[in-house]
Image (spheres, helix red, strand yellow):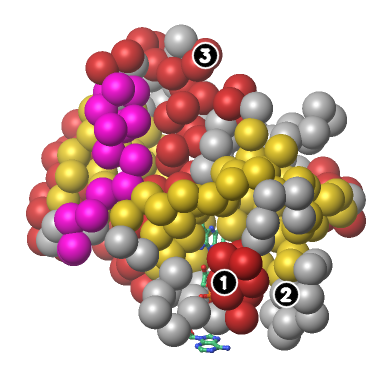
Amino acid sequence: MSFFQDMFSIFKKRELLFLESHKESEDVYSFLFEKEKDLNWKAGQYGLFSITHKTIKNATKPFSVASAPTENIVKITTRISDDPSDFKKALLELKQGMKVKMSGPVGSFNLEDNSPSLLIAGGIGITPFRSILKQLEADGAGEQKQIKLLYLDAKKSYLYKDELEVIAKNTSTSVTYLDSRDDLQGEIDKFNALYKNNGKYFIAGPKSLVDSVSSYLQSNNVSKRNIKKDAFYGY
Ligand SMILES: Cc1cc2nc3c(=O)[nH]c(=O)nc-3n(C[C@H](O)[C@H](O)[C@H](O)COP(=O)(O)OP(=O)(O)OC[C@H]3O[C@@H](n4cnc5c(N)ncnc54)[C@H](O)[C@@H]3O)c2cc1C
C-alpha cells in the first residue's frame, strides 16, 4: 500500500460496532467488532482505534487487525496488565452495541510475492501474522509459498496455538515455538543459510525485540529492503 493510499485511508474514520470480547490467555484479550461491507484491509495491516464512550488521554492507539478480511469480522488482540492504561480500561468497559472509531487500515506489513518468507513474532506481535496466515489458508495459497513462522514467547503462553496448528496442517507453513533469543537466532541462521537475500523477513512485536532482530539480520548480510517491521510501542 502506497504512502498516498495510507494518507487517504488514515483520514477516513468510521465507527465500529462492538460485538464481544474474550480472554485468549491470562492477561490477553481479543475484542471483536462488526465488519461493515465497505471496510477492507490487506492481511497484516493495522488500524488506529479510538475510544469514544468516554473522554480519556491518548484515546487513539494503533492495533494490528488480527482477523483476516475473509473472516468478516474485525478482531484486535491485546495484553492488559493488572495496572492498565486508561485506553485498555476503556476497552474492558465496552458492552455489546457500544462503538469505537477506527481509521485506516494502513501499513505495508503484507506478504507481497512468493518469496520464501520468515515471519518472526515476539509475544503479542503474533497478531498481524494471525491475519496473514488465516488469509493464506482461506486463499488456498499456502502450497506455493515457503513460509516459516518463528514464535518467541519467554512465558510460553502462545496465543492462537490451536488455530496455528490447523493452518500449519492446511498449508505448507511451518510453525516453530521458541522461548529463548538464542534459539530464535539459531532458527534465523538456518533460514538465512538456505535463502540468504532471496528470502523476506517480517518481524513484529515489542520495539526492543524488533530492533534487535533487525540489527541481527543486517549484521548477517540481510539487506534492509528484505526486512519488514511492525514495532509495537508500550511493551
Ligand atoms: C503498527 C502497530 C501495531 C500494533 N498492534 C498491536 C496489537 O496487535 N496488540 C497490542 O497489544 N498492541 C499493539 N500495538 C501497540 C499498541 O498501540 C499499544 O502501544 C500497546 O498495546 C500498549 O498500550 P497501553 O495502552 O498499555 O500503553 P501505554 O499507555 O504506553 O501504557 C504502558 C503501560 O504503562 C502503564 N500505564 C499507562 N497509563 C496508565 C494509567 N493511566 N494508569 C496506570 N498505569 C498506566 C501500564 O502498566 C501500561 O501497561 C501496535 C503498535 C503499532 C505501532
Q: Quadrant of residue 235?
A: bottom left
The answer, for residue 197, to whether it is visible in the render is: no
Q: Is residue 73 left or right of residue 142?
A: right
Q: Tell me the kind of residue under disc 3.
A: Asp
Question: In this figure, which residue is indicated by the disc labeled 1?
Answer: 88
Q: Is residue 225 left or right of residue 56?
A: left
Q: Tell me the kind of residue under disc 2.
A: Ala
* 55 in relation to 72, above or below: below
**Which-is-in-front pick, marks 3 and 1?**
1
Q: Nearer the viewer, residue 103 or 80?
A: 80
Q: Quadrant of residue 168?
A: top left
Real-space CA distance between mark 3 and mark 1, rounded to the nearest whole angstrom: 34 Å
Where's the N terminus, which quadrant? top right
Q: Tell me the kind of residue under disc 1.
A: Lys
Q: Are marks 2 and 1 in contact (CB under 8 Å)?
A: no
Classed neighbour count for the residue bearing mark 1: other residues with Cα under 10 Å, few (<14), some (14–19), many (≥20): some
Residue drawn at the location 49% of the way across and 33% of the way down: 132
Q: Earlier in the sequence, mark 3 or mark 1?
A: 1
* Residue 3 locus on image (x, y percent): 77, 50
Residue 164 falls inside the magenta stretch:
yes
Classed neighbour count for the residue bearing mark 2: other residues with Cα under 10 Å, few (<14), some (14–19), many (≥20): some
* Residue 119 locus on image (x, y percent): 35, 41
| Mark drawn on residue 139 | 3
Mark 1 lies within 8 Å of ligand 1 (Cβ measured): yes
Q: Quadrant of residue 39?
A: top right
Q: Are marks 3 and 1 in contact (CB under 8 Å)?
A: no
Look at the numbered disc 2 and give the secondary structure of its residue: loop
Highlighted magenta segment, given as a residue range: 154-168
